[in-house]
């Protein structure tokens, strides 16, 4: 009996009991669909993290004011004494491994061009900001150090702001009004996409930080030249933990924080944030994998159960086949083939359902997903393996039947 004969027999048996076969494969369908969805979401999450790493860089530290206590009560983050230009310069000069640093002073205000109005984040930065963030200029240019010092009214737009205000037209050379103040657009940034699955990094306008202080943001009188937060870029081979320790020590001295008192500022390590997100995504992937594995095992038990019923129902047929010359190996192959085909049918249905669910998630939840050919092969291979493993016992039972007893079976 050839493999093609076994496939033909298996197809006929499944078609004759179509409804029972579909119900039997529900576990396989759910398991394979879970594998597809799990792998697609996991791959999409990994790609998102890789994009964030390339966008932020793992050799960066973010410094920001912390919270302060007033009459024994702690206020919200960012309410402590602001960081200043002097703090940033001290870090650049005194902390080994620091290559670049920029301040970042943000506010949210309407930006107007003609009859178009868009509320966005306007951020004051230094001239080295594109180098610190590894963010390319799409059109035009960025500010120069002398322009930042003189406080010119220049603006560089993120791609989302360009689309909202200018559509497909070029923004360079045009004039926009920010909080009623006219700014000349001298450049636009390359598209960066979303961060954290929800925040649009391109929905931003950059202006010189000195201009932001004098024209857009209410300056804090407690320190001269406040910068809001500081982005520090280190040499690739520099140990972030050591640089973080040195910066913390330096700021404690500059801010006169007594020994034993807690910091009134925070130093965030981008690499640690990315690592924590990767660990969370990995945990989610393992949970989904466990769900898929349980579904496949349950589906395999269902396959084994229905194949045992099939062996019982077809005992006389098995006896007749043996009587006309079928060997035990042929009977074993026949029932194993039926089990595998049944699982592959369930796997194909599960593959379709999983793909559909994946695209629904991508469309309505705005979640990054990615289905690779390797995932499809793994899902189909897993369903075929379930058919082989859980179909072996019924197939062996059929192959070991005594032909005479089988022919007499009522």
Image (tube, grey):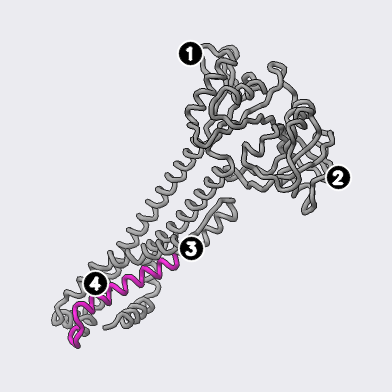
Image position, residue 122 (x, y; %):
73, 35
Q: Residue 356: tell me if it is visible.
A: yes
Q: Indicate whether residue 337 is drawn in magenta.
A: yes
Q: Give the residue number, with chain letter if any, for mark 4.
A: 395
Most frequent secondary structure within the magenta stretch? helix
In this rendering, the label closer to the viewer, 2 or 3: 2
Magenta segment: 322-350
User: Which residue is depicted at the point 80% across and 32% down?
Assistant: 152
Closest to the observer, 250 or 341:
250
Alpha-carbon distance for marks 2 and 3? Answer: 49 Å
Q: Give the residue number, with chain letter if any, for mark 1.
A: 260
Mark with earlier residue (2, 3): 2
Q: Label for residue 114?
A: 2
Q: Which residue extends farthest bottom?
A: 324
Image position, residue 257 (x, y; %):
55, 14
- Position of the N terminus, as image quadrant, is bottom left
In this rendering, the label closer to the viewer, 1 or 3: 1
Mark with earlier residue (4, 1): 1
Q: Please, is residue 118 above or below residue 12 in the view?
A: above
Closest to the observer, 153 or 320:
153
Alpha-carbon distance for marks 1 and 3? Answer: 59 Å
Disc 4 packing (10 Å; few <14; some 14–19; many ≥20):
many
Mark with earlier residue (1, 3): 1
Alpha-carbon distance for marks 4 and 1? Answer: 74 Å
Q: Give the residue number, with chain letter if any, for mark 3.
A: 353
In this rendering, the label closer to the viewer, 4 or 1: 1
Is 72 on the left-hand or right-hand side of 312?
A: right
């Amino acid at each position: 009996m050839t493999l093609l004969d076994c496939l033909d027999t298996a197809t006929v048996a499944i078609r004759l009991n179509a409804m029972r076969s579909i119900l039997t494969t529900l576990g396989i369908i759910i398991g394979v669909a879970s594998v597809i969805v799990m792998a697609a979401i996991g791959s999409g999450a990994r790609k998102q993290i890789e994009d964030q790493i390339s966008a932020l860089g793992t050799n960066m530290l973010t410094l920001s004011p912390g919270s302060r206590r007033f009459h024994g009560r702690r206020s919200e983050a960012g309410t402590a004494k602001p960081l200043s230009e002097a703090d940033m310069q001290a870090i650049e000069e005194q902390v080994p491994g620091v290559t670049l640093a920029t301040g970042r002073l943000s506010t949210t205000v309407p930006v107007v061009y003609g009859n178009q109005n868009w509320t966005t984040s306007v951020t004051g930065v230094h001239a080295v900001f594109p180098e610190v963030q590894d963010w390319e200029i799409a059109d035009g240019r960025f500010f120069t150090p002398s322009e930042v010092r003189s406080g010119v009214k220049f603006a560089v737009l993120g791609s989302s702001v360009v689309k909202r205000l200018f559509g497909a037209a070029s923004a360079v050379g045009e004039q926009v009004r920010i909080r009623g103040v006219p700014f000349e657009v001298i450049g636009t940034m390359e598209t960066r996409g979303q961060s954290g699955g929800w925040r649009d990094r391109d929905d931003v306008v950059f202006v010189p930080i000195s201009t932001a202080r004098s024209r857009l943001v209410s300056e804090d009188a407690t320190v001269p030249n406040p910068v809001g937060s500081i982005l520090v870029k280190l040499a690739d081979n520099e140990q972030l933990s050591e640089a973080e320790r040195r910066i913390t020590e330096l700021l404690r001295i500059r801010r006169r924080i007594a020994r034993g008192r807690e910091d009134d500022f925070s130093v965030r390590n981008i690499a640690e944030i990315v690592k924590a997100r990767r660990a969370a995504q990995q945990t989610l992937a393992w949970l989904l994998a466990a769900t898929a594995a349980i579904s496949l095992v349950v589906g395999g038990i269902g396959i084994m159960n229905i194949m045992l019923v099939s062996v019982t129902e077809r005992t006389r047929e098995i006896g007749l086949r043996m009587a006309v010359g079928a060997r035990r190996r042929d009977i074993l192959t026949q029932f194993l083939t039926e089990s595998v085909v049944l699982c592959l049918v369930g796997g194909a249905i599960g593959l379709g359902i999983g793909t559909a669910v994946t695209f629904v998630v991508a469309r309505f939840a705005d979640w990054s997903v990615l289905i690779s050919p390797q995932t499809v092969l793994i899902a189909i291979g897993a369903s075929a393996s379930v058919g082989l493993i859980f179909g072996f016992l019924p197939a062996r039972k059929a192959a070991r039947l005594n032909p005479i007893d089988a022919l007499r079976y009522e």
